[in-house]
Amino acid sequence: MISLSFRRLLACAFGMAIAASAVSTAFASEVCMNTSNGNGGYIDYYPYLFNNNTFGWSNDKSGSSECLTLNYTNSANNGVYYDGFGSTWDWPTNTPTQYDVKAYPSVVYGWQYGYTYSGLGLPAIIYDNTNVPVYMSYSITGSQSEDLLIDNWILSTPNASAQYAEMEVFVTDTFSEQTSGNLGSITLDNIFYYVSDRNAGAWEAYNFIPNNNSTSGTASLNMKDFVNALVYDYGVFPNSKYLGGTQVGMEIYQGDGGITFNPVAISTN
């Protein structure tokens, strides 16, 4: 997914200034797309970047709206902490672009087009076999013209400014894309996937697609297993490449709806 902006919105700063009290309180930050230019903005909250990525806005500008909301809890015992995020959207159907991705609101861990926090363990060279566990609990409402996926960037060097390849691990599959498994199929983390590749313009994209169109559930996956499958089972790139960044979000195609994550957790070890 292509991000349009890297303006820092230190939205969590105001939350840290709230004095602790005996009672926990909840509050939120929100960034919404600008309908004049499609710029969704983002929120920094270490170790995550919550990116309201509206890269496909130009495919359908008419009457569209979309927001990303980051939820916090201010606890007397634990301070201010993130306890989930979500997105809501209203994207009218507009053929022939109804099947184009309009936005990808997501939580980013690691590299994102040259932007990264330090000290996260990413980028990580593949032959080091670094674990990258991803956990999520999700609930989707409204029209089901979207896909929940974990997007990953593969880099040639740890300080690369552009990606070498993309690895998309789908959690849900609205459009039954599993029929395009031209590389084959595999079972990883106890889930069966069709595996496909496609040209994304300047890079190759590799997709792991399950047979799942659920609107709620949990997922616990290790991105190391998927990278290793591409390297050692399919041989599509060498283990001298780097896993640069991992992000969890919703590809929005059309219609109205929302998704809530309670929460998403990404780490390395």
Image (cartoon, rainbow, N blue to C red):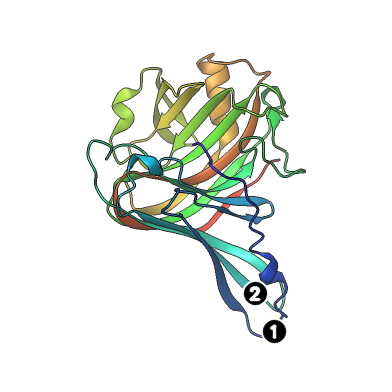
Quadrant in the picture for the C terminus: top right
* Residue 239 picture quarter: top right
Left or right position of 252 against 93 = right
Residue 140 visible in the picture: no
Question: Which mark, by number, is residue 47?
Answer: none
- Indicate the amino acid at tag 2: Asn
Which residue is pictured at 46% across the width and 22% down the height?
201
Residue 49 visible in the picture: yes
- Indicate the amino acid at tag 1: Ser
| Residue labelled with disc 1 | 21
Residue 157 lies, with reference to residue 147, above or below; the image says: above
Residue 128 lies, with reference to residue 131, above or below; the image says: above
Left or right position of 260 against 253 = right
Left or right position of 269 against 175 = right
Q: Residues within 10 Å of mark 1 (few under 14, many from 20)?
A: few
Q: Are marks 1 and 2 in contact (CB under 8 Å)?
A: yes
Q: Secondary structure at mark 1?
A: loop
| Residue labelled with disc 2 | 74
